[in-house]
Image (cartoon, rainbow, N blue to C red):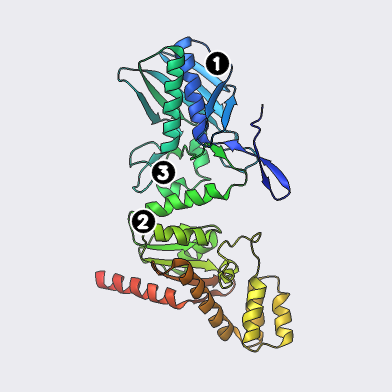
């Protein structure tokens, strides 16, 4: 039976799911029952940190040489999730040491860089899932009358292939996916999960550098690589659309210099104070070009063309035709810098570089120029 909890998204009701951490706890609970009682429970239940009960049947199981294992399939609800439908397996065995001992097996990543939830060398099973697994195992041990130690190995057979679709390789988690979940529940279409993943990556970068480059995605990464102008030895993080969140996290992680390298289509929105650049929140690109052109004396026809332009590259073409690119872009860069400074609140230096796939580098804010000059001097002094 499907997990029946829903949240409203606009005019739709979307079904929630449960995390890999919840699956691991359920699987471990079932496996302990199978190990001690010699039979598979009809169903298992776990109370998530969110306070919602998850009760499911066991999807797969087996025993071998003093070990028992059970598998629970990940149910993401209506969320589009790379881990949807994955089988999360817990293999358990008796331990000579008291307590519950948790490790990761095939398809569960290993941490190789500092600054993440788990120390280097540990399986990428985060703290909350570890606690859920331990509590579930202890509760089942008590239920079946077993008071010895238990070894638990969590594996995800398709985890290594799935990891390529996640942030794990960039974060230094190798060999598989992470077992995650702070609430135990997957909120459908949840932006929080993505923000949390990016925050974890930023925390990792903060452990090795006080300088950071933020870029929305593949366009920015390609631009930086192909131009070769950003080889400052500074780590970078892709922030998707969540610029405001990342600027806030940069304060918490005590970065000193943050440089944003972004395509004009996203960055121009920041000139209007927009800090989530997804089009469903704000698509004011042509309006911003039009407003800055108008206050700099653009005629009605030019403003009308800008408002009706289908792309930001088309806006640049229109400004070039009117001989107004420099003055309008100068205004836009000053507006971007103003809003970045306001969000950073003086906690660090911040600036932005803007590019276009058609026109290449379009310019940079004053803050970006100062940051890049600082980084260039550092390279020269160390060479």
Q: Quadrant of the C terminus?
A: bottom left
Task: Report whether residue 370 is seen.
Answer: yes
- Which residue is drawn at the image coordinates 50% and 20% (left, top)? 30
Above-or-below relation of 35 to 163: above
Residue under the point 53% across and 19% down: 61
State the residue in front, 364 or 97. 97
Q: Earlier in the sequence, mark 3 or mark 1?
A: 1
Classify residue 10 as left or right of residue 124: right
User: Which residue lies at the image location 63% right of the left edge and 77% below the top edge?
Assistant: 289
Q: Is residue 13 left or right of residue 240?
A: right
Residue drawn at (57%, 33%), measured in percent from left and top?
52
Q: Is residue 293 above or below residue 247?
A: below
Q: Residues within 10 Å of mark 1 (few under 14, many from 20)?
A: some
Q: Residue furthest left?
A: 382
Q: x, y percentage for residue 106?
A: 44, 31
The tag earlier along the polypeptide, 2 or 1, is 1
Taking depth in this image into account, of 5 and 258 the one nearest to the observer is: 5
Q: Secondary structure at mark 3?
A: strand
12 or 19, nearer to the observer: 12
* Tag shown at residue 173: 3
| Side of 288 where 19 appears, left or right | left
The quarter of the displayed image where residue 133 is located: top left
Q: Earlier in the sequence, mark 2 or mark 3?
A: 3
User: Separation of disc 2 and disc 3 at Cα?
Assistant: 16 Å
Q: Nearer the viewer, mark 2 or mark 3?
A: 2
Dot 1 corresponds to which residue?
A: 41
Residue picked out by circle 2: 206
Which element is circle 1 on?
Answer: loop
């Amino acid at each position: 039976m499907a997990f029946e909890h829903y949240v409203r998204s606009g005019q739709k009701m979307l079904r929630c799911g449960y995390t890999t951490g919840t699956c691991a706890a359920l699987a471990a609970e079932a496996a302990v029952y199978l190990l001690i009682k010699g039979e598979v429970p009809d169903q298992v239940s776990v109370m998530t940190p969110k306070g919602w009960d998850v009760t499911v049947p066991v999807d797969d199981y087996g025993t071998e040489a003093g070990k028992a294992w059970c598998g629970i399939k990940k149910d993401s609800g209506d969320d589009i999730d790379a881990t949807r439908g994955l089988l999360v397996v817990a293999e358990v065995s008796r331990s000579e040491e008291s307590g519950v001992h948790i490790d990761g097996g095939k398809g569960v990543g290993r941490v190789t860089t500092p600054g993440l939830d788990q120390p280097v060398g540990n399986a990428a099973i985060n703290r909350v899932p570890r606690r859920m697994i331990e509590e579930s195992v202890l509760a089942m041990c008590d239920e079946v009358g077993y008071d010895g130690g238990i070894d638990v190995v969590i594996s995800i057979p398709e985890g290594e292939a799935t990891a390529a679709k996640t942030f794990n390789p960039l974060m230094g988690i190798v060999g598989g996916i992470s077992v995650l979940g702070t609430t135990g529940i997957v909120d459908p279409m949840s932006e929080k999960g993505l923000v949390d993943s990016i925050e974890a990556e930023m925390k990792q970068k903060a452990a090795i550098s006080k300088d950071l480059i933020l870029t929305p995605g593949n366009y920015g990464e390609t631009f930086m690589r192909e131009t070769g102008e950003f080889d400052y030895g500074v780590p970078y993080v892709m922030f998707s659309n969540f610029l405001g969140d990342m600027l806030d996290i940069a304060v918490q992680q005590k970065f000193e210099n943050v440089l944003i390298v972004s395509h004009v289509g996203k960055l121009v929105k920041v000139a209007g104070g927009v800090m989530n650049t997804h089009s469903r929140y704000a698509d004011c690109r042509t309006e911003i070009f039009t407003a800055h052109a108008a206050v700099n004396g653009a005629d009605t026809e030019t403003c009308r063309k800008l408002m009706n332009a289908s792309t930001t590259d088309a806006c640049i073409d229109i400004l070039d035709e009117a001989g107004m690119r420099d003055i309008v872009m100068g205004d836009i860069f000053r507006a971007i810098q103003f809003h970045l400074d306001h969000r950073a609140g003086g906690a660090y230096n911040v600036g932005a570089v803007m590019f276009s796939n058609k026109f290449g580098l379009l310019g940079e804010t004053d803050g970006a120029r100062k940051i890049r000059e600082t980084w260039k001097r550092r390279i020269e002094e160390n060479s």
